[in-house]
Image (tube, rainbow, N blue to C red):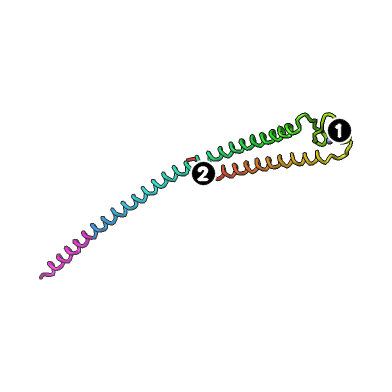
Amino acid sequence: MSEKKKKAIEVEKAIRINTANIKAATVNATMCEVNAKTYENNMIELDRLHKIKMNNIQLQIDRYIDNLKEMHKVLDDLLAEKEALHLELKEVFHYGEIICEFCGKYFTSQGISRHRQACSSKPVNKAIVEHEAEITEVSVDIDARKAALLAEIKRLEKVKPKRT
Ligand SMILES: [Zn+2]
């Protein structure tokens, strides 16, 4: 075989290898592109689902904040009703009697004037003090509950995600 022929065979072989390598690299590049596109689509879809879910969660938070406010209104009304019923109960039990404005006790119409005179002359009336303490206790409870409600609403509104 001549030197020229040998060289030609070598070059032709190199060309065949080069062509095969180009084909393989082209296939690899295409697969990389397809994979990248697939992951991109996955990301877009996850982002879309995430937004839907976050919106739903926010709607739920809004709904429960409204319910919470409503429940506390209901509780306020029920507590007011309880107080009114308590007064009614006292009136029913002491029907026909007269209440002493100093000690809050009930007396017959015959007994009240004598008692009132004695009761009003006491420098400190224990029953009035006790009753006032009771009223204060109830209103402190209501104030504490309202403060807790406001704090909870503030916290929930901080927690809830921004609407997207
Ligand atoms: Zn009295």
Q: Circle 1 sits on which residue?
A: 116
Residue 91 percent coordinates (x, y) = 74, 32
For the record, the magenta segment spans: 1-20
Callout 1: 10 Å neighbours few (<14), some, many (20+)?
some
Q: Which amino acid does the dot numbered 2 rest on?
A: Pro
State if disc 1 and disc 2 touch (CB < 8 Å). no
Q: Is residue 70 left or right of residue 116?
A: left
Residue in view at x 10 percent, y 70 percent? 1
Residue 127 percent coordinates (x, y) = 81, 40
Most foreground residue, 113 or 79: 113
Residue depth check, mark 2 versus mark 1: number of the one nearer the observer: 1
Most foreground residue, 65 or 8: 65
Q: Which amino acid does the dot numbered 1 rest on?
A: Arg
Residue in view at x 86 percent, y 40 percent? 124
Q: Is residue 95 left or right of residue 57?
A: right
State the predominant SS element of the stretch in magenta.
helix
Q: CA distance from mark 2 to mark 1?
A: 64 Å
* Residue 154 sits above or below residue 106 on the image: below
Residue 140 occupies which quadrant of the picture? top right
Q: Circle 2 sits on which residue?
A: 161
Residue in view at x 79 percent, y 30 percent? 97
Residue 29 percent coordinates (x, y) = 29, 55
Q: Is residue 146 left or right of residue 59?
A: right
Residue 32 occupies which quadrant of the picture? bottom left
Most foreground residue, 110 or 149: 110
